[in-house]
Amino acid sequence: MDPMLSSPVHFLSLSFFLIFFHSSEMLVECTAFTFVNKCGYTVWPGILSGSGSPELETTGFELATGDSRSLQAPTGWSGRFWGRTECSFDGAGKGSCATGDCGTGGVECKGSGAAPPATLAEFTLAGPASAKDFYDVSLVDGYNLPMVVDVRGGTGGCASTGCVVDLSRRCPAELRVGEACRSACEAFGKPEFCCSGAYASPGTCRPSVYSQMFKSACPKSYSYAFDDATSTFTCSGADYTVTFCPDSAPSQNSQKSARDYPTPRTGGVVLEDDSWLASLAAGAAPNTKTRVSFLHQSLLILSTTAFILLLL
């Protein structure tokens, strides 16, 4: 037998080193997404992972007024978040929502997206293809409630973005559906509004009077499919907070909660391809990175101690 392995100290030292190096490979730094509801009514966030990205620990949940919840997303994850409103679910979790419904008949969205109109927060996290996170708040599929994305930590641009204005007050009659506001694409289905067919390029699809209305109210949000220049933001190594109704207005506070809608509407039409915005593949406890670093440091201390014992 190798004399190095015959000593308990040497054996323990080798074990610590193996644990340390294997843990370095296994530890994956995650991004924390925290959801905050400042609306005067309950919101049911929905979550849809992009193609090739794993589902998070939940795909939909209830978030009462004043509550918050955090989720973890792995490196390279992409997907979108939105808020469902005026929902009614029974004791078995079966039901539907008036806006943002994902069509599963339950609280969990299970891989289904939001029926428009819905305000969307979209993310593509840093991974092998890019060292930056890309994120935006989109009104391309319409608007159903105010939403803001704030950044915690990180380097780079890392700007906050979103739509704090109550667009239901400004929505033209031809786009209005209940308390939500449809996009011109959903309302009229014309290629020039949908950036499809002969209008499927930045050169041919230009802002419409409707998208300009959205843009003037919420200048940092996507207003139509090729609105990239002023609407896509980047950051590296950050966590994110998604807030519903960040500056809750009286009309939002006066909306009825889910329990006041025993038979909610299920309006909205799901886009057939459920496409992401203009090539954007489209988020955990806030201290995820801290926990990972602490574990890594602890293993390093143990390995160093073992190495010192080895030299004694």
Image (cartoon, rainbow, N blue to C red):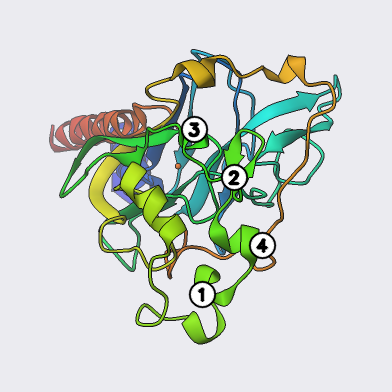
Within 10 Å of disc 1 (Cα), the crowding (few <14, some 14-19, many 20+) is some
Q: Secondary structure at mark 4?
A: loop
Residues marked 4 and 2 touching at CB (< 8 Å): no
Marks 4 and 3, how far apart at CA:
25 Å
Camera-nearest label, 4 or 1 = 1
Q: Which percent across, then down, holds residue 59?
A: 63, 40
Marks 4 and 2, how far apart at CA:
22 Å
Q: Which percent across, then down, holds residue 294?
A: 28, 28
* Front-most of residues 78 and 89: 89
* Front-most of residues 263 and 58: 263
Numbered circle sitting on residue 169: 3
Residue 11, located in which quarter of the rendered image? top left
Q: Which residue is tagged 2? A: 173
Mark 2 belongs to which amino acid?
A: Ala
Q: Which percent across, then down, holds residue 115?
A: 67, 49
Mark 4 belongs to which amino acid?
A: Leu
Q: Is residue 290 above or below residue 191?
A: above
Q: Is residue 207 above or below residue 156?
A: below
Q: Which residue is tagged 1? A: 192
Q: Which residue is tagged 4? A: 271
